[in-house]
Image (cartoon, rainbow, N blue to C red):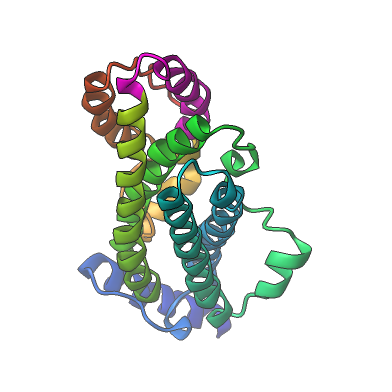
């Protein structure tokens, strides 16, 4: 009977997903769907908080008072994004305290383990990574899990504000012949690392995410959208964008 119940739940759930309806209650999702959902949401939650921690030293390290305030605001946004994600996870029965304090946010994207050493590193990371996050969040906004979709709508808006901060500084540093080599070096360093955050192409897990409408596109399609948006910007700044690579 339990197998039949799960099968009936799966069929009812898929009917809603295919019709474009949002799923709202844990009672209407299968264990398989929940496991895929948690994988994606935990990775995002840990990455949001890790991103905030990475920016913290740059409240002190920013070159001007206005930039110290900008960094403080970005940190505040990222911590709030992390809290919003952990709140969603808690409602699904996840031990959030363990994720943060015992697991030490081990599900974060690999790029968040890299130290940000210079101001040029900081603003290039800001330019590349927040833009990458914006493209990934677009899929989450359109996802089938209603609580996540609505939360992502607000987070997406704020991530694009962060992107504009990175654009302003990359353009400024690239325009100065004294600092252009430094910002080019930062681009060369961070680009391959951010290129990887989208994940491997054409994987079975990504096909499952797409089936459940937890993702809308293949990882490489999202990577290409990110890349194509940056090309004219960086060319206009006089910087050389490395070639995009497929992650397999």
Looking at the rendering, the stretch of residues picked out in magenta corresponds to 174-196
Is 139 above or below relative to 177? below
Q: In which quarter of the image is residue 230?
A: top left
Along the horizontal axis of the image, is 47 left or right of 234?
Answer: right
| Residue for point 55% across, 56% down | 52
Residue 159, horizontal then vertical, whole percent? 36, 54
Along the horizontal axis of the image, is 173 left or right of 45?
Answer: left
Query: How many numbered tags mark residues here?
Result: 0
Q: Principal SS element in the magenta part?
A: helix
Is 88 above or below relative to 163? below
Which residue is nearer to you in this view: 243 or 6? 243
Outermost residue toward the front in this view:
65
Outermost residue toward the right in this view:
102
Residue 112, horizontal then vertical, whole percent? 59, 44
Residue 71, horizontal then vertical, whole percent? 47, 53
Asked whether 181 falls inside the magenta stretch, the response is yes
Asked whether 63 falls inside the magenta stretch, the response is no
Which residue is nearer to you in this view: 214 or 238? 238
Task: Give the quarter of the figure containing the N terminus.
Answer: bottom right
| Residue for point 55% across, 54% down | 47
**From this viewpoint, is residue 233 visible?**
yes
Q: Quadrant of residue 10?
A: bottom left
**From this viewpoint, is residue 248 visible?**
no
| Residue for point 30% across, 68% down | 17
Residue 160, horizontal then vertical, whole percent? 30, 51
| Residue for point 40% across, 36% down | 128
């Amino acid at each position: 009977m339990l197998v039949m119940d799960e099968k009936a739940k799966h069929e009812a759930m898929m009917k809603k997903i295919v019709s474009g309806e949002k799923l709202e209650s844990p009672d209407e999702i299968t264990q398989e769907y929940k496991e895929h959902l948690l994988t994606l949401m935990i990775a995002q939650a840990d990455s949001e908080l890790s991103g905030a921690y990475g920016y913290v030293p740059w409240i002190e390290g920013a070159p001007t008072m206005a930039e110290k305030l900008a960094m403080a605001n970005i940190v505040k946004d990222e911590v709030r994004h992390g809290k919003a994600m952990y709140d969603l996870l808690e409602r699904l029965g996840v031990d959030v305290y363990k994720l943060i304090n015992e697991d030490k946010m081990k599900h974060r994207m690999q790029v968040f383990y890299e130290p940000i050493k210079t101001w040029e590193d900081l603003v290039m990371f800001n330019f590349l990574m927040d833009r990458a996050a914006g493209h990934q969040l677009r899929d989450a906004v359109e996802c089938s899990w209603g609580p996540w979709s609505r939360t992502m709508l607000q987070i997406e808006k704020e991530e694009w504000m962060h992107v504009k901060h990175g654009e302003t500084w990359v353009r400024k540093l690239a325009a100065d012949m004294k600092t252009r080599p430094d910002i080019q070096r930062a681009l060369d360093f961070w680009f391959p690392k951010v290129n990887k955050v989208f994940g491997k192409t054409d994987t079975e897990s990504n096909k499952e995410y797409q089936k459940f409408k937890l993702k809308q596109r293949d990882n490489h399609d999202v990577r290409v959208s990110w890349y194509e948006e940056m090309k004219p910007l960086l060319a206009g700044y006089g910087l050389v964008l490395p070639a995009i690579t497929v992650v397999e």
